[in-house]
Image (cartoon, rainbow, N blue to C red):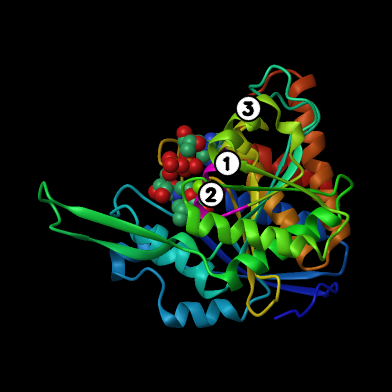
Amino acid sequence: MTQGSEQAQSIDLAVVAGDGIGTEVVEQGLAVLDAALAGTGVKVTTTDYDLGARRYHATGETLTDADLAALRGHDAILLGAVGDPSVPSGVLERGLLLRLRFALDHYVNLRPARLFPGVRSPLADPGEVDFVVVREGTEGPYVGNGGSVRTGTPHEIATEVSVNTAYGVERVVRYAFAKAAARPRKHLTLVHKHNVLVHAGHLWRRTVEAVNAEFPDVTTDYLHVDAATIFLTTDPSRFDVIVTDNLFGDILTDQAAAITGGIGLAASGNVNPDRTAPSMFEPVHGSAPDIAGQGKADPTATVLSVALLLDHLGHTDAARRVEAAVEADLAERSTGPARVRSTAEIGRELAARLH
Ligand SMILES: NC(=O)C1=CN([C@@H]2O[C@H](COP(=O)(O)OP(=O)(O)OC[C@H]3O[C@@H](n4cnc5c(N)ncnc54)[C@H](O)[C@@H]3O)[C@@H](O)[C@H]2O)C=CC1
Ligand SMILES: CC(C)CC(=O)C(=O)O
Ligand SMILES: [Mg+2]
């Protein structure tokens, strides 16, 4: 595994295409990755991992210890999406995707939200939208701490406990402050619901106050998550860096995608900042069974996730070129003649801009 963010001359990439449109968009992401590195001397080797609904139906497995051990050996992972209507809800999402994020200690779920020039937002006057959501990735209500008693009876009681540790909150908050400090506006917004979720909320608030002392240049504010959804719609340009927990971050980043041109454009990185295991890059969207197999999925979110992957591995020039290709493509969508392009056509045209 490549250590540090220095630029290596090879990339050993694990590919988990997964389910539904995952396979379609990952194919295009890989084609763009190849095009971005062509002529640079950087060699990419890929290893496909058969994980997802097909494997589950064939073997009953979601992610074995052997799979995990093998995945740990790569420089990074590119993931499409997991989840299929033929598999009970939660089996793959928890047993595969969340298991990967937890086992590989992806405590930062980095989700940039930018309204690219020329892209139409559903908001009448969105202003300049360019913020980053730093979503906690290994704790919160997603840890699986819960259960159900008297299941299936009128007296059923189901719990899903949100786990927030001082260690876990502090490390993601510190990452978010560092991110804010490196951006021109240097502003951090904590989003939670500490007026009701007092135990977890106060831990988050105290942690932000304490870590702020290390980053005196960063200004901070706080929004309850319900109010945050209002401002994402009425005044999204107010945001610079948002730090929040696993569940709130999941929801807010679908909304952030919607206001910046749609879920087909929203990229993410599941980052292990300490580099004790490979980070994993994936579009924010899911497997989209409603359009799977039809060539209708926009691969741009995956392509922008490839740019995040390149950045993470130190290939910053290639990352900027991938972003520039996306920017040019998106700008042309608004100025050029209206065209309905397939997943493969968009991927091919993006790759062509890089050759
Ligand atoms: N990271 C992951 O692997 C995720 C997996 N899921 C799983 O995916 C399955 C479907 O979940 P949904 O809630 O429907 O969310 P979804 O994100 O798959 O789809 C929501 C809507 O967005 C559209 N959409 C998604 N990606 C698109 C793209 N690239 N281009 C154009 N349109 C796109 C879909 O057609 C659908 O109408 C479920 O099994 C869910 O658990 C959901 C979210 C994330
Ligand atoms: C499917 C979930 C486990 C995750 C999700 O919706 C997300 O990370 O955006
Ligand atoms: Mg989500």
Residue drawn at the location 88% of the way across and 62% of the way down: 39
Residue drawn at the location 70% of the way across and 81% of the way down: 1
Amino acid type, residue under disc 2 in the picture? His
Q: CA distance from mark 1 to mark 3?
A: 15 Å
Residue 319 falls in image quadrant: bottom right
Residue 294: x and y in percent read 47, 36
246 falls in the magenta region: yes
Above/below status of 203 relative to 61: above
Q: Look at mark 3 in the image and give the residue it sits on.
A: 233
Q: Outermost residue toward the left?
A: 153
Above/below status of 202 relative to 264: below
| Secondary structure under the numbered disc 3 in the rendered image | helix
Task: Kindly indicate whether the residue at mark 2 contacts the one at mark 1 (C-beta within 8 angstroms).
Answer: yes
**Going from the N terminus, do you reach mark 1 or mark 2 first?**
2
Residue 215 falls in image quadrant: bottom right
Q: CA distance from mark 1 to mark 2?
A: 7 Å
**Going from the N terminus, do you reach mark 2 or mark 3 first?**
2
| Secondary structure under the numbered disc 1 in the rendered image | strand
Which residues fall within the magenta stretch? 244-254
Provide the major secondary structure of the magenta segment: helix
Q: Look at mark 1 in the image and give the residue it sits on.
A: 224
Residue drawn at the location 73% of the way across and 27% of the way down: 119
Is the CB atom of the residue marked by disc 3 within 8 angstroms of ligand 3's nearest atom? no
Q: Is residue 132 left or right of residue 58?
A: right
Is the CB atom of the residue marked by disc 1 within 8 angstroms of ligand 3's nearest atom? no
Q: Look at mark 2 in the image and give the residue it sits on.
A: 194
Residue 33 visible within the image:
no
